[in-house]
Image (tube, rainbow, N blue to C red):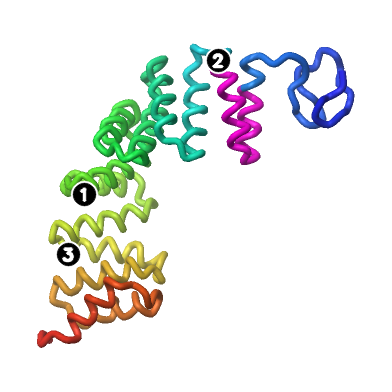
């Protein structure tokens, strides 16, 4: 049998070409699953979707196929399809923490923040050490205006996985919103060590310092934000206000 992809000859009993990995002969569900995984690894998302859709038709009771297909819909920018497909995967097996996580992120991307929270919390019920679920819960609760819970989940992520430094950035923003400016500065400084040229970070630090009446530090951070990005409008407005103020 000759491979339709590379043209080389393979033994009649081979299911896959030993040279290029192409599926030989009639394809079953497992063949389409493998083909989809190969397309995904090559960045051919539409081809991967097509293969996994065929696999799903032939393996309707396999939750992992629908999980993979849902992930691909998400990557292709179709969060609604991703949600429907991931929900179906969970109908087949609701113990999959990774699928609950993927569903939560897909809900969030689609603008269903409340449903995202529900799915991410289910993820943590199955796996309390799922780091990224804490991350997205912190983000989602902040967008819902629930600052105490946003703070709680960012702090929990940092406690469990302190190398997740970006959580310090989000926690700093939450602390600014809560009026906990000293704590905000502490968290921003953790991020500043690794990302000193971030104009948004400099702006938020400048704001926190100003609320602590540490005006020289506030002005220095705002000036730094504008050095990095002269078009940072918020930093310019805040800096101009402070420089025009009679306060020391």
Left or right, 207 with respect to 105, comes to: left
Near mark 3 (Cα within 10 A), the count class, few <14, some 14-19 or many ≥20, is many
Mark before the other along the chain sequence, 2 or 3: 2
> Marks 2 and 1, how far apart in space?
43 Å
Residue 87's image quarter? Answer: top left
Near mark 1 (Cα within 10 A), the count class, few <14, some 14-19 or many ≥20, is many
> Marks 2 and 3, how far apart in space?
55 Å
Residue 54, x across and y down, in percent: 59, 19
Residue 69, x across and y down, in percent: 51, 27
Q: Are marks 1 and 3 in contact (CB under 8 Å)?
A: no
Q: Which residue is at a point 80% across and 30% down the rendered structure image? A: 5
**Does the stretch in magenta take in 37?**
yes
Which is closer to the viewer, label 2 or label 1?
2
Q: Main secondary structure of the magenta part?
A: helix
Q: Which residue is mark 1?
A: 151
What span is in magenta? 33-57
Residue 131, x across and y down, in percent: 36, 40
Residue 185, x across and y down, in percent: 24, 66
Does residue 92 sit above or below 33 in this rendering? above
Q: Are marks 2 and 3 in contact (CB under 8 Å)?
A: no
Residue 11's image quarter? Answer: top right
Q: Which residue is mark 2?
A: 57
Q: Residue 181 — which label?
A: 3
Mark 3 secondary-structure assignment = helix
Q: Where does the N terminus fall, quadrant-wise?
A: top right
Which is closer to the viewer, label 2 or label 3?
2
């Amino acid at each position: 049998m000759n491979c339709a992809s590379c043209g080389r000859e393979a033994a009649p009993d081979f299911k896959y070409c030993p040279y290029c990995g192409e599926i030989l002969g009639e394809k079953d569900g497992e063949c389409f699953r493998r083909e989809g995984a190969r397309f995904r690894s090559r960045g051919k998302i539409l081809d991967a979707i097509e293969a996994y859709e065929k696999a799903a038709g032939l393996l309707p009771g396999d939750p992992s196929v629908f999980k993979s297909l849902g992930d691909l819909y998400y990557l292709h920018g179709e969060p609604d399809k991703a949600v429907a497909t991931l929900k179906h995967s969970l109908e087949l097996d609701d113990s999959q923490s990774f699928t609950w996580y993927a569903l939560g992120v897909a809900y969030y991307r689609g603008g269903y923040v409340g449903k995202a929270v529900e799915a991410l919390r289910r993820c943590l019920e199955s796996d309390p050490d799922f780091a990224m679920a804490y991350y997205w819960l912190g983000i989602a609760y902040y967008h819902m205006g629930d600052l105490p819970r946003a703070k709680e989940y960012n702090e929990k992520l940092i406690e469990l996985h302190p190398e997740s430094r970006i959580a310090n950035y989000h926690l700093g923003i939450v602390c600014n919103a809560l009026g906990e400016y000293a704590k905000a500065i502490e968290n921003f400084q953790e991020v500043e060590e690794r990302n000193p040229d971030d104009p948004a970070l400099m702006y938020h630090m400048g704001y926190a310092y100003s609320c602590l009446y540490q005006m020289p530090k506030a002005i220095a951070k705002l000036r730094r934000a504008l050095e990095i990005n002269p078009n940072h409008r918020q930093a310019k407005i805040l800096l101009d206000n402070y420089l025009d103020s009679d306060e020391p």
